[in-house]
Image: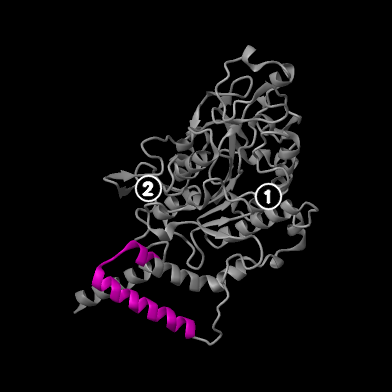
Amino acid sequence: MLKRCASGFGAVALAGLNADPAFSSTAMHGLHHAAQAKNIIFLYMDGGPSQVDTFDPKPLLEKFDGRNPSELFDVEPTQFNNNGNVLASPWKFHQHGESGIPVSELFPHVAACADELSVIRSMVSEFPEHTFANYFLHSGSGLQGRPSMGAWINYGLGSECQDLPGFVVINGGLIPPGGLDCFGSGFLPASFQGSVFKPSGSGVANIEPLDSRPGRQRAELDLIAQLDGFAADRFGEHDSLDSAIRNYELAYAMQMAVPDVMSLADEPAYLQKQYGMESKFEPTRTYAAQCLIARRMIERGVRFIELTCPAVSGDRWDQHSNLKKGHENNALAVDQPIAALLQDLRSRGLLDETLVVWAGEFGRTPFAQGNNGRDHNPMGFTIWMAGGGVRPGTIYGATDDFGYKAIENRTEIHDLHATMLHLLGVDHTRSTFRFGGRDMRLTDVKGHVIHDVIA
């Protein structure tokens, strides 16, 4: 009798844990080693910021401004092959913080956080075109329909939040080229795909219950679950059905959680101002709300949050012409909110466990497209990370003297993904899913952890 009771108690405990997304069977392996980060905020810079105008200063561009680049180095084919002369950066660089990291005048607020940054100047991509490069950045594959990194991370670790999705995309107005597949779950269970929120209003459409009678909606969900259970008994388990059941239950829980997380009026006035909620520039206000909501979601245990860029006059960071105005507008939109996010996370003791990643899908050429733009350049560009176990105030890798190609510590997107997973306590070679006859993973058959940027 005692043996049977003990087993029964164990089963009850197991059932309770299995109901918690952080412990359920959908988290396939959990931690492989001690984690330095618990969550990720991915600041996606749509279109490809210019590395030589942001975090990778190149004095030779000024020296040889206006010269034919073919006389100075081998020029590779570009996306549009409308190549002009060497183009000096319109902005000055200054060293900041005790680390002395150079930051362009485009980012006066982020520059104040230089000692938090781990800047990687030697990133490369395999694709020079937005759609394929976006799939590659988000999923480790240039093919459409592969699982996004947010889906992989939640598949491996589960979520610490029971009433919000584990993978959230806060859409500032620009869905990347490649569309919603950039945030999809691919061949992973559908419950791991990104949920898209707006940074204003209710955040999610139809979040308010239509039936005000207490218990009516719960009874409807229970009936749906019963009917789905009959289908599962008759036809067997199926991912789309299981995911639908989980999504119904999550949506029910979100009716309370989403209005709470979206209530920015609860934030102190000084903090809203620090983020840029009172800015005269509307895109800054939009991105400020995105960053503030992201911090509130981190506090509630959301595992992976991606922020897309707000729309500004002149296009996303894709300045094939009018580089100066375009990059200034995009920087103005994101600079103050990003700096406030880093400072706010630090002040709350959350930055050490939150990895913040700033990246576009590729960089730009050191020579002009036409007269005053820059074409796509996947052969050497800059990203940065902060918090979450990375070594602060450091620079890793280098491009050549013109900022054209990575020549030192060449770093691939697979390496970035491997490092992100490592900081979360996951071995990227062991986080796999059987599909198409082999064990698939975010880093495919590549990827090395960038140990030199880890604290």
Which segment did they paint magenta? 216-243
Q: Which residue is pictured at 48% across the width and 36% down the height?
A: 413
User: Which quadrant, please, contains the N terminus?
Assistant: bottom left
Left or right, residue 223 beside residue 2: right
Query: Depth-wise, is mark 2 or mark 1 nearer the camera?
Result: 1
Q: Which residue is pictured at 49% across the width and 64% down the height?
A: 161
Tag 1, which secondary structure? loop
Q: Amino acid at mark 1?
A: Ala
Magenta span dominant secondary structure: helix
Q: Which residue is mark 2?
A: 32
Residue 72 visible to the viewer:
no
Above or below: residue 43 compared with residue 399:
below
Q: Which disc, if any, is residue 311? A: 1
Above or below: residue 227 compared with residue 288:
below
Left or right, residue 114 beside residue 134: right
Residue 436 % position (x, y): 29, 46
Residue 217 % position (x, y): 48, 81
Give me the C-alpha separation between circle 2 and circle 1. 40 Å
**Mark 2 crowdedness (10 Å alpha carbons): few <14, some 14-19, many ≥20:** some
Q: Amino acid at mark 2?
A: His
First in sequence: mark 2 vs mark 1: 2
Q: Is residue 222 on the magenta stretch?
A: yes
Residue 120 % position (x, y): 57, 33
**Mark 1 crowdedness (10 Å alpha carbons): few <14, some 14-19, many ≥20:** some
